[in-house]
Each structure stands twice: as C-alpha cells, then as structure tokens.
Amino acid sequence: MNIVIFTGAGISAESGIPTFRTNNGLWENHNIEDVCTLNGFNRNPTLVWNFYRDRYLNYSKALPNNAHYAITELQKYCKTKNINCSIVTQNVDGLHQKAGNEDVIELHGSITKFKCNECGEKTDKNLWESNKVLSCISQKCSGLMRPDIVWFGEMLPPSIDTALELSKKADKILVIGTSAQVYPAAEIATLGNQYNNAIVYEFNLKPYLSLFNEYYEFWKGSASKTVPKFVDEFMKV
Ligand code: BJW
Ligand code: ZN
C-alpha cells in the first residue's frame, strides 16, 4: 500500500502559525506582489527580509501539534507493515521534521535555508541573525541573500516530480489543512484519485476539494483532533 500525506498551513494553525488565505492571514497587511515574488524582493529587499525574519522568529518558537505527532506514529506503524508513507508539504515551517516525521518533501522550500538572488549560491547557515539583508555569501557576486522559498512565478524544486509520481501511485491520500489553490502543488491532492482510484481523505474546517466521488471522505474539524483520530482508527484495522 502507498500512502501520501499532503499538508498545508492549516496543519500548523494550532501551533500558532497563521494560515495564508484567512481573515487574519499573513498577507493581510501585505500585498502578495510585494512579499511573495522576486520582483517584490528586487524592489524592496528590506521589506521582504523583515517580513520573513518576523515569520522565522515566530516559527522558531512554534512546537508541533498532535496532528504532526500522529503522522510520526503513522509512519512508524507503516514501517512495521511494509506500507510506504510519504509526506509532501507546502509548509516552510519545519514542524513536520521537529515532530520526527521522516523524508519530508518540502515543495515550497524552507524558512531556514537561503540562496543568492543572482548566482543561486545556497546556505543553511542562520542568516536571520542579521536584521539587514546580506550580500551574497560567495563573495564573487553582487547579489543579495534571500530565503530559499518558492515565490509566485518561480519553479518548484525537482522533488515536485517525485511528489506527483507518488500521488499518481497512491492508494490513500491524506490532504491536511490546505485550500489546494496553489499549483502545481495542489495536483498532489487529487492525481492519485484520477490515476489509481486513491481514496482521498480531506482534513479541514470546511471542504475545498470538490471531489464528489465514492473515493472521497471529509474529516471536518481541526487537524490536531481529526488526524490523531484517523491514525488511531487506521492502526486498529
Ligand atoms: C485548518 C485549520 C485547522 C485552518 N485544521 N485545517 C494563474 C495566474 C497566475 C499564476 C498562476 C495561475 N495559475 C497558476 C499559477 C501559478 C501559481 C498559482 O498557483 N497561483 C494560484 C494562486 C492561482 N503558482 C506558482 O507561481 C508556482 N510556480 C509555478 O507555477 O512555476 C511554474 C512557472 C514558472 C514561471 C512562470 C510561470 C509558471 C509557485 C507557487 C509558490 C507558492 N508559494 C507560497 C508562498 C511561499 C512563501 C511563504 O511561505 O511566504 O506558498 S503561496 C502560499 O500558498 C504558500 C503556501 O505553501 C501555499 C498554499 O497555501 P495553503 O497551505 O493551502 O494555505 P491556505 O491559507 O490557503 O489554506 C489553509 C487551509 O487550512 C484552509 O483551507 C483552512 O480552512 C485550513 N485550516 N485551520 C485544519 N486547525
Ligand atoms: Zn551570488
């Protein structure tokens, strides 16, 4: 059996991390164009640096919640039963890893990694210690360091192909806390249903997927409650 767990900002909501597309969402006080595009960074690197630095300071204090920990339990169980259980996240907060989730594919990057906006030189040294944007660490280039996060209009890392293949072959897909509006990531939620009749379990406060077929189950409520319940039930069978 192949399980894919696909997560978005909602899984971290109960860890105190705001989601994107809600009333109090992160973009409320910012134009998306200004903080989530390369053009925005080129126009005002200091604004973007401070926006992400503030988020990093919040994320670094955040702890995983019961949904993340339930996934750790599920992965352990799957190992004993020879079930493949992959995690694909759109989140950049690192909470899956903090909870001990393994082999997490981070489709939209990570807030603890950086790259140069010109030569692409990467580092995972903590540059957030600086409250000013830093010049390229390669010292051969006049670029600026930016978070290694995927902004609108940018390519996802090559692991998107692995994630799409995993979804196509999945028997069960757990879609947790995402509005599934951002592509190509959103395809992971439904591809397995189209290719393999995968059962899609959506864990959210309200349904977003519009999958009106018999291979779809909606688990209403906060992920920190519904995901542990699902995992308990799954491990009993
Ligand atoms: C709970 C809960 C609880 C709350 N329990 N649930 C048409 C026009 C223009 C562009 C496009 C277009 N069509 C497609 C595109 C491309 C674009 C795109 O998809 N745009 C759409 C918005 C239309 N995509 C891209 O640009 C991507 N790249 C690309 O396509 O490259 C190819 C290309 C290259 C060059 C030219 C053209 C094409 C890149 C997308 C990168 C997105 N990155 C972001 C920002 C990262 C930086 C950052 O973190 O600041 O990633 S966008 C933002 O959305 C972030 C998230 O990962 C992503 C997904 O959001 P998510 O996680 O779903 O959060 P929310 O807030 O939307 O939902 C939270 C959910 O949780 C809700 O449903 C709640 O109900 C729920 N919830 N509490 C359970 N307790
Ligand atoms: Zn550089």
Image: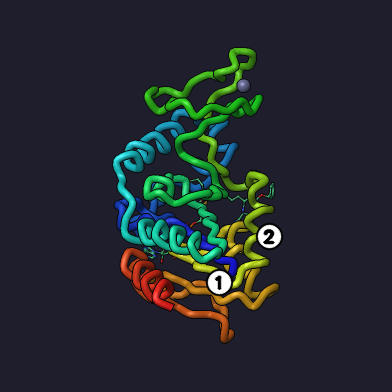
- Whole-angstrom CA distance, mark 2 to mark 1, is 14 Å
Q: Residue at x 41, y 37 (%)?
A: 51
Which residue, as the protein is rendered here, is positioned at the far front? 80
Quadrant housing residue 117: top right
- Find disc 1 in the rendering and name its residue: 172
Q: Which residue is mark 2?
A: 165
User: Relative to residue 4, is residue 28 depicted above or below?
Assistant: above
Say what secondary structure mark 1 lies in. strand
Residue located 48% across and 59% down the image: 7
Q: Where ligand 2 lies, by quadrant? A: top right
Quadrant of residue 233 in the image? bottom left
**What is the crowding at mark 1: few (fewer than 14 residues within 10 Å), some, or many (at least 20)?**
many
Percent across and percent down for residue 58 are: 32, 41
Residue under the image location 37 percent in, 50 percent down: 99
Position in image of residue 101 (x %, y %)? 44, 51
Residue 13 falls in image quadrant = bottom left
Task: Indicate the secondary structure of the residue bearing disc 2.
Answer: helix
Q: Nearer the viewer, residue 171 or 181?
A: 171
Badge 2: residue crowd in 10 Å (few <14, some 14–19, many ≥20) = some
What's the residue type where badge 2 is placed?
Glu
**Image height of 192 relative to 129, above or below:** below
Left or right of 168? Residue 70 is left
Is residue 54 at all visible to an observer of this figure?
yes
Given residues 82 and 25, the one toward you in this image is: 82
Amino acid at the residue labelled 1: Lys
13 or 154, which lies in front? 13
Q: Residue at x 58, y 62 (%)?
A: 186
Residue 79 percent location from the top left of the image: 50, 59
Q: How is the image coloured?
A: rainbow
Which quarter of the rendering shows the N terminus?
bottom right
